[in-house]
Image (spheres, grey):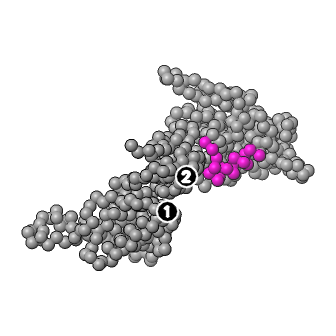
């Protein structure tokens, strides 16, 4: 009975059901210890390193970078030290041992033999099923090694068209395998290509010999081939008369007739955001209220703190302090609606406030949250907002930091816009948006003046409160911005 231990991809927090494998941190044949990071995966929340609960020798890596793995499915197999290893080979990964051999002395046979000898030496940087450092096993063949591209007996006896098709298929296979062998990076072992990548390259006419691999030891990854496929064609002189996309040989959209230049899978953070926003719009009967606010006093207060040499929190931290105070006064907006087992709905209230704020990152829009924000001063809020923004942009925020908010603050003014009817961050019940602060004409004591003005927009779930509550909260925050001293006694 095998003693190999199989580690299943665990739930990485917040009930996530899948994760994208970004990068392996170990290779088949490596000896690992307990809690050693073995892989980087990107969940719908963040990028995390997965540690191994077992010590031993890596036997199988169940997946390739770029694949989406389901929680509860095998991630890695580990054989305890001292237990003989039996190489695990997946059927779709046995094509290396199936290379068609041309008549004795041909280039394909010679290169294949050289390749096999190199793999026996053990490179440490090979794909699953293609050999490991010091490994004695070889990939299982599913077809005979010696294959003739032409069968004389069949030709003499009037073979059927099926036999001829088989011969052509074998010929194509020989060309494919020869291309595989020649696409390795010179001077580096194990820089081979998975069958999936080879098939993708063949279907799109990509010359693998001209592709620069970005994986370990120059392995050509799926993303490398996709980059070549989606690369815009070199501009050429336009024909005298426009030609349909179909005539030019481009992939054409059936509805518009336009050529399709790329297809980008919805995955990771983008996939999670899309699902969350769609659910919010389909489940929440939202309403929006807004108000223009004179922020001159707040801007002047911050400028005064900076001039006096004190640490001045950012304007977002000040507004966050006002929002927390407003949620204490109007707790209906700091709730969540849950459906019970019998289909009834309940409004769930919390004893604290986890204030989320929207942060734009290279991976998409994420919402880290300041936990127990009601206990923090404006300066402490500023410190935590800056810290969370930094870890979110590095992709290092934890699931609890990204999925525990009870109310969201969205500063879209940084994008140079004044207002937005934001979508509520499900399962929360409200989101407050802040527009840019700009000079506008404003009436002060009956006189026209130029003031620093911003727009606040509150989108709320009409199931938890009515317009009176929403308007009261929005007016409270607006008044605090216009008279910051009334709320900021603790800064």
Q: Is residue 94 left or right of residue 78?
A: left
| Residue 11, horizontal then vertical, whole percent | 53, 40
Relative vertical location of residue 82 with respect to residue 345 in this rendering, above or below: below
Figure quadrant of the N terminus: top left
Q: CA distance from mark 2 to mark 1?
A: 14 Å
| Residue 270, horizontal then vertical, whole percent | 54, 49
Relative vertical location of residue 151 with respect to residue 467 in this rendering, above or below: below
Relative vertical location of residue 187 with respect to residue 222 in this rendering, above or below: below
Relative vertical location of residue 177 with respect to residue 488 in this rendering, above or below: below
Q: Which residue lies at the image location 38% right of the left edge and 68% below the top edge?
A: 116
Q: Secondary structure at mark 1?
A: loop
Res. 178 image quadrant = bottom left
Figure quadrant of the C terminus: top right
Q: Is residue 426 left or right of residue 138?
A: right
Q: Which residues are magenta?
A: 383-399
Q: Within the magenta stretch, is there residue 335?
A: no
Q: Which mark is residue 403?
A: none
Camera-side residue of 162 and 338:
162
- In primary-sequence order, the first of circles 2 and 1 is 2
Q: Within the magenta stretch, is there residue 392?
A: yes
Q: Which residue lies at the image location 29% right of the left edge and 78% below the top edge?
A: 105
Q: Is residue 255 left or right of residue 435?
A: left
- Magenta-colored segment: predominant secondary structure: helix
Camera-side residue of 64 and 77:
77
Q: Classify 10 Å Cα crowding around label 1: few (below 14), some (14-19), many (20 and above).
A: many
Mark 1 highlights which residue? 124
Q: Which residue lies at the image location 16% right of the left edge and 62% below the top edge?
A: 162
Mark 2 highlights which residue? 32
Q: Secondary structure at mark 2?
A: strand
Residue 42 visible in the snapshot = no
| Residue 71, horizontal then vertical, whole percent | 48, 42
């Amino acid at each position: 009975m095998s003693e190999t231990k199989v580690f299943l991809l665990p739930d990485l927090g917040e009930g996530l059901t899948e994760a994208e494998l970004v990068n392996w941190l170990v290779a088949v044949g490596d000896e690992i210890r307990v809690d050693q990071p073995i892989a980087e995966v990107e969940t719908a929340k963040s990028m995390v390193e997965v540690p191994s609960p077992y010590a031993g020798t890596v036997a199988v890596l169940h997946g390739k970078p770029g694949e989406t793995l389901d929680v509860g499915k095998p991630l890695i197999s580990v054989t305890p030290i001292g237990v003989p290893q039996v190489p695990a080979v997946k059927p779709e990964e046995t094509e290396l041992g199936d290379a068609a051999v041309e008549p004795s002395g041909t280039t394909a046979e010679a290169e294949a033999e050289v390749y096999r000898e190199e793999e026996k030496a053990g490179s440490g940087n090979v794909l699953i099923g293609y050999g490991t450092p010091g490994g004695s096993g070889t990939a299982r063949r599913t077809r005979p090694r010696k294959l003739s591209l032409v069968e004389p007996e069949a030709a003499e006896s009037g073979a059927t068209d099926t036999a001829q098709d088989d011969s052509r298929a074998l010929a194509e296979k020989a060309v494919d395998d020869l291309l595989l062998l020649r696409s390795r990076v010179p001077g580096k072992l194990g820089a081979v290509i998975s069958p999936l990548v080879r098939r993708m390259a063949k279907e799109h006419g990509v010359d693998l010999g001209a592709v620069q691999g970005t994986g370990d030891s120059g392995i050509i990854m799926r993303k490398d081939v996709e980059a070549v496929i989606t690369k815009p064609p070199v501009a050429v002189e336009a024909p005298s008369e426009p030609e349909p996309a179909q005539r030019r040989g481009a992939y054409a959209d059936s509805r518009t007739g336009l050529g399709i230049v790329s297809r980008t899978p919805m995955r990771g953070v983008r996939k999670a955001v899309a699902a969350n926003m769609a659910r919010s719009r389909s489940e929440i009967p939202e309403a929006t209220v807004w108000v223009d606010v004179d922020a001159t006093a707040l801007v002047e207060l911050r400028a005064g703190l900076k001039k006096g040499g004190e640490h001045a929190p950012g304007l977002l931290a000040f507004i966050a302090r006002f929002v927390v105070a407003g949620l204490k006064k109007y707790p209906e907006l700091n709730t969540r609606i849950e459906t019970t087992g019998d289909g009834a709905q309940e409004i769930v209230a919390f004893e604290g406030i986890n204030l989320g704020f929207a942060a734009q990152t290279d991976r998409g829009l994420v919402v880290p949250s300041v936990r127990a924000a009601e206990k923090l001063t404006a300066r402490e809020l500023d410190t935590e907002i800056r810290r969370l923004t930094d870890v979110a942009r590095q992709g290092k925020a934890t699931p609890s930091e990204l999925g525990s908010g009870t109310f969201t603050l969205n500063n879209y003014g940084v994008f140079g816009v004044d207002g937005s009817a934001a979508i509520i961050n499900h399962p929360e019940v409200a989101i407050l948006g802040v527009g840019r602060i700009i000079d506008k004409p404003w009436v002060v004591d009956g006189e026209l003046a130029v003031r620093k003005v911003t727009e606040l927009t509150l989108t709320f779930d009409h199931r938890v409160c009515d317009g009176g509550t929403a308007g009261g909260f929005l007016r409270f925050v607006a008044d605090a911005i216009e008279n910051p001293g009334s709320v900021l006694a603790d800064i």
